[in-house]
Image: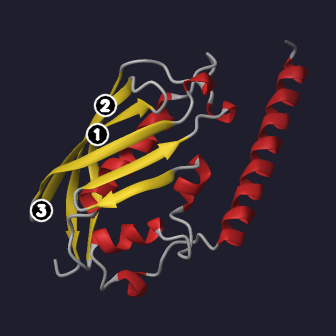
Amino acid sequence: MTEIARELMIDRAAAARRRIQEQIAEQVRELGVDGTPLEQVAGLSGHEFLGRWMQPEIPPPPAIAVLFGMEWLEVSEGRVVLALDPAQWMFNPLGMIHGGVAATLLDTALGSAVHTTLPPATGYATTDLHIRYLRAMNVETGRVVATATAVHSGRRNATAEGRIEAEATGKVIATGTAGCTILRASE
């Protein structure tokens, strides 16, 4: 490939990326997914806050969940179940779904499972995320389901474990654990 052809390819990719990002930003604004002001959720427990997304009249969940097409299937105390349909735009260079998609899905489910255990005015941040990939995920895998459970939720730290399974076959795609630091407004 000549240097000119390479530069043209890089320019085309950058222009496409800008158009995609602008389109996503526009769609997210139209959905009203711009984050929830803290004063609106300060009195809600994590379970109450996340449980809102199980109700169709509530605005959609965070933009990352909308972008990846995550569907909230269950939100209960200490447990969250999400689903995702793998898509071609998620491919890595080898034609499989990029491992970061599974990591993002598990991080969302694991953190949310921890969040459901927290009282009002309390947040969390992932401190570590460990993923074990057991098999490749591709478009033919079909819809996948991530199930996460809070294992420990203490005053300063929490942990959760989870897995992603192919919905049609029950085959495990990946497992994961996460540690979270608890963020209390009073501290």
Q: Is residue 187 left or right of residue 177?
A: left
Q: Position of residue 109 (x, y in %)?
A: 36, 49
- How many C-alpha atoms fall within 10 Å of the one at disc 2: few (<14), some, or many (≥20)? many
Rendered-image quadrant of the N terminus:
top right
Tell me whether the residue at label 2 lies in contact with that at label 3, contact meaning CB atoms closer than 8 angstroms: no
Which of the pair 3/97 is nearer the observer?
Answer: 97
Which residue is depicted at the point 28% across and 39% down? 162
Above/below status of 11 relative to 133: below
Secondary structure of residue under mark 1: strand
Question: Mark on residue 175?
Answer: 2
Dot in front, 1 or 3: 1
Tell me whether the residue at label 2 lies in contact with that at label 1, contact meaning CB atoms closer than 8 angstroms: yes
Which residue is depicted at the point 21% across and 68% down? 118
Mark 2 or mark 1, which has the lower sequence index? Answer: 1
Secondary structure of residue under mark 3: loop
Which of the pair 145/122 is nearer the observer?
Answer: 145
The residue that disc 1 covers is 162
Q: Can you name the residue that lies furthest to the left here?
A: 154
Above/below status of 72 relative to 137: below
Q: Position of residue 92 (x, y in %)?
A: 60, 24
Disc 2 from disc 3: Cα separation: 24 Å
Residue type pointed to by label 2: Thr
Mark 2 or mark 3, which has the lower sequence index? Answer: 3
Q: Position of residue 34 (x, y in %)?
A: 58, 72
The residue that disc 3 covers is 156
- How many C-alpha atoms fall within 10 Å of the one at disc 3: few (<14), some, or many (≥20)? few
Residue type pointed to by label 3: Arg
Q: Is residue 168 left or right of residue 174?
A: right
Residue type pointed to by label 1: Gly
Q: Position of residue 154 (x, y in %)?
A: 9, 60
Which residue is depicted at the point 36% across and 19% down? 134
Secondary structure of residue under mark 2: strand
